[in-house]
Amino acid sequence: MTTAHKYTPPVFLVPAPKIQKQLAEPIKVPGTDEKVSDLVIIHDPSKCTGCNQCMIGCAYKHYRTFDRRFALLYVNESPNKNGFYVNANCQHCVFPMCLASCPKEAIYKDEKGIVRISPMLCVGCGTCNQACPIGIPRLDDERKIYVKCDFCDGEYPMCFQMCSTGALKLLPRKEAFELVKKLRSV
């Protein structure tokens, strides 16, 4: 009499960590119960010249190319005002919709609050791009996975370092909310 052997597939991939953030000095985010102390990048369009150095720096940091099409943030001329530039970059949301939408749990928030995509788990389905309010995750055509800003692995982001006019600011989330309110009222 032969007993049936239950097949257990080998585990080759380590799942993305489910890390709860441990924060030293949390601050309350307006409109939520979440408390965070992480930094975000804010764009001041009144200072931006559209030079695209931020995009070039990002592309070089991640892909070793000066081709701005490889950047993980976007600066474009405003459709409403000539000579006025708008920026779109990942805000590493408190409640990331990209993370919630990922069917493979390839997106996670690390201990620093950085929202990341695991290249080993991503299947390139694009639900993260569709769920993101500003469509930040983009398809890496060569690797066939989605990529997004990783905050330069927690260092000072290259886009921020390359911005010679000071249009990109690196601020704690609470200060960033206040600055955005101020910028919108102008």
Image (cartoon, rainbow, N blue to C red):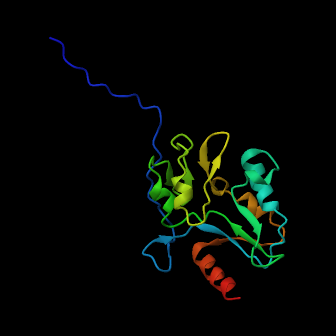
Where in the figure is residue 60, as x and y percent of width and height?
Answer: 78, 49
On-image quarter of the C terminus: bottom right
Q: In percent of the image, x 48 and y 57: which residue is there?
A: 99
Q: Find the residue positioned furthest to the top.
A: 1
Where in the figure is residue 81, as x and y percent of width and height?
Answer: 78, 79
Where in the figure is residue 48, as x and y percent of width and height?
Answer: 80, 73
Q: In percent of the image, x 60 and y 55: which residue is there?
A: 137
Query: In the picture, residue 178 is in which quadrant?
Result: bottom right
Q: Is residue 60 visible?
A: yes
Depicted 2 relative to depicted 18: above or below: above
Residue 137 left/right relative to 98? right
Residue 57 left/right relative to 106? right
Where in the figure is residue 9, as x and y percent of width and height?
Answer: 37, 28
Q: Nearer the viewer, residue 136 or 12?
A: 136
On-image quarter of the N terminus: top left
Q: Nearer the viewer, residue 174 or 7?
A: 7
Q: Find the residue positioned furthest to the front.
A: 79
Q: In percent of the image, x 60 and y 61: which residue is there?
A: 135
Query: In the picture, residue 51 is in which quadrant?
Result: bottom right
Q: In percent of the image, x 82 and y 61: which residue is there?
A: 53
